[in-house]
Image (tube, rainbow, N blue to C red):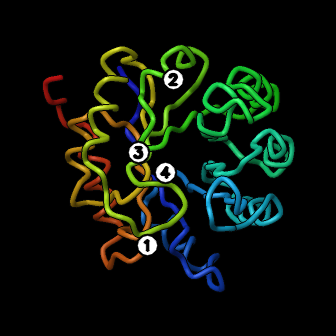
Amino acid sequence: MGPKPTVGVSILNCNFVEIKTELKILIESGIDFVHLDVMDGNFVDDITFGPSFVRDLIKEFPNIIFEVHMMVKHPHKFIDSMANAGVHRFIFHFEATNNCYNHYSHSVEKLIESIRSSRMEVALAINPETDVKRIFEFVPSIDCALIMTVHPGRGGQKFIPEMMSKCLELSKRFPNLDIEVDGGVGPKNSEICGRSCVTRIVSGSALVNSERKSSDVIQMRNCLTQPAVSN
């Protein structure tokens, strides 16, 4: 048995004034987890929210998994605060480490060690332009690989189908790895995700704006059980 197929929601396109009401509706629609995009205005242009906002949401909805997607220049600075907020899974970018660019202070290995010490699951993300082979050496030490299917930093972008080859390559080499996709994903392209061995979908505006959220969640989750295409 491989990883369990799951579907989560990114709240980036929610109305933040009514975020708790909107999130309650999304949770009741059957999502498996909540994906929180934390942006610092440096790694990406936009700024979103920090640990206090995350802590408040987790306190309000204690019975669902929360993961944080750290689109920040210095992810190590957030590890303790996110762990203390109750975060289940901490996602950091390969591109924010000195394994990718030498001007960054922390290595992938050091970040994995620190996240593990804080008792959170570890996920490693890569941008569309990054060769997936660059993270192969770290896969045995992580719980999940996140393949960005848009360029990070803004919601509502168009899905990049060429990223599915990365998912197939990862799955072929590491069949028990959870493979997550984030960016432009919804019911219309969830089947190609399933056939590319994706096990975890993050859906943003497609799900947030849907008038049939529950059936969309079921459809996307079911698509993740599709047989893989030949790779």
Camera-side mark, 3 or 2? 2
Front label number (2 vs 4): 2
Q: Give the residue type at disc 1.
A: Val
Q: Read off the residue under disc 4.
A: 32
Category of crowding for the residue at label 1, using alpha-carbon neighbours closer than 10 angstroms: few (below 14), some (14–19), many (at least 20): many
Query: Taking the image as drawn, is residue 68 in sight?
Result: no
Give the residue type at disc 4: Asp
Q: Which residue is mark 1?
A: 208
Separation of residues labelled 1 and 2 (CA atoms): 31 Å
Q: Give the crowd class for mark 2: few <14, some 14-19, many >=20 residues within 10 Å.
A: some
Q: Amino acid at mark 3?
A: Val
Q: Report helix, strand or loop for mark 1.
A: helix
Residue at left offset 21%, top offset 60%: 188
Whole-angstrom CA distance, mark 3 to mark 1, is 17 Å
Image position of 49 with respect to 191: above or below: below
Q: Badge 3 is on which residue?
A: 181
Q: Secondary structure at mark 2?
A: helix
- CA gap between label 2 and label 4 equals 26 Å
The spot of residue 183 in percent (x, y) is 41, 56
The percent coordinates of residue 172 (x first, y second) are 30, 17
- Residue drawn at x 72%, y 60% is 40
Distance (Cα) linking label 4 and label 3? 14 Å
Name the amino acid type tagged 2. Answer: Ile
Alpha carbon distance from label 4 to label 1: 14 Å
